[in-house]
Image: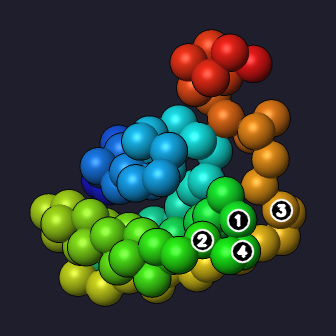
């Protein structure tokens, strides 16, 4: 059975090219929902800034990585800025890396 944790592990392959760290550690993956016995996955994510010049590329990578999971046939990726991302949303490891 596909789990949210498995999807998040796969999304660690999506790296924010400006920061050099994956979206999961940065706290940019807001929500993951697995439906239809793992055949469909919804991912709600954000960017560090609404003006991010690579936002389209990141969204494509989120879709590609989600669809790369065995058994996933469809995905819906939703970019949101509610709530706005802040450095406090990063994982403890990312905060340590950035000296926060």
Q: Quadrant of residue 90?
A: top right
Residue wearing tag 1 = 49
Nearest to N terminus: mark 3 or mark 2: 2
User: Which element is circle 4 on?
Assistant: loop
Question: On the rendered structure, is 96 left or right of 70?
Answer: right
Is residue 52 visible in the rendered image? The answer is yes
How far apart marks 3 and 4 lie (CA) works out to: 9 Å
Q: Residue at x 53, y 36 (%)?
A: 25
Q: Name the image colouring.
A: rainbow
Separation of residues labelled 1 and 3 (CA atoms): 8 Å
The disc, 3 or 4, on the residue closer to the chain's N-terminal end is 4
Q: Which residue corresponds to mark 3?
A: 84
Number of numbered tags placed on the structure image: 4
- Whole-percent x, y for residue 6 in the image: 34, 46
Residue at 77% across, 55% down = 85
Q: Marks 3 and 2, Cα distance to the nearest angstrom?
A: 13 Å
- Mark 1 residue element: loop
Choose mark 1 or mark 3, whichever is in front: 1
Residue 82 rendering spot, x and y as whole percentages: 83, 70
Contact flag, marks 4 and 2 (Cβ < 8 Å) = yes
Left or right: residue 97 versus residue 9 is right
Spot occupied by residue 40 in the image (x, y as percentages of width and height): 37, 79
**Residue 3 to residue 20: above or below:** below
Query: Pointer 4: what residue?
Result: 50
Q: Position of residue 44 (x, y in %)?
A: 60, 70
Could you tell me how far apart the alpha carbons at marks 4 and 1 are, in whole angstroms? 4 Å
Q: Which residue is mark 2?
A: 52
Mark 1: give few (<14), some (14-19) or many (20+) Cα within 10 Å. few
Q: Is residue 13 left or right of residue 35?
A: left
**Mark 1 vs 3, N-terminal side:** 1
């Amino acid at each position: 059975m596909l789990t949210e944790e498995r999807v998040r592990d796969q999304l660690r392959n999506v790296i924010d090219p400006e920061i050099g760290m994956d979206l999961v550690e940065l706290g940019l993956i807001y929500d993951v929902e697995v439906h239809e016995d793992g055949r469909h996955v919804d991912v709600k994510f954000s960017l560090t800034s609404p003006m991010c010049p690579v936002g389209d590329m990141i969204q494509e990578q989120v879709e590609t990585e989600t669809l790369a999971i065995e058994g996933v046939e469809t995905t819906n990726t939703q970019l949101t800025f509610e709530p706005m991302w802040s450095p406090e949303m990063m994982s403890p490891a990312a905060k340590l890396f950035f000296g926060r």
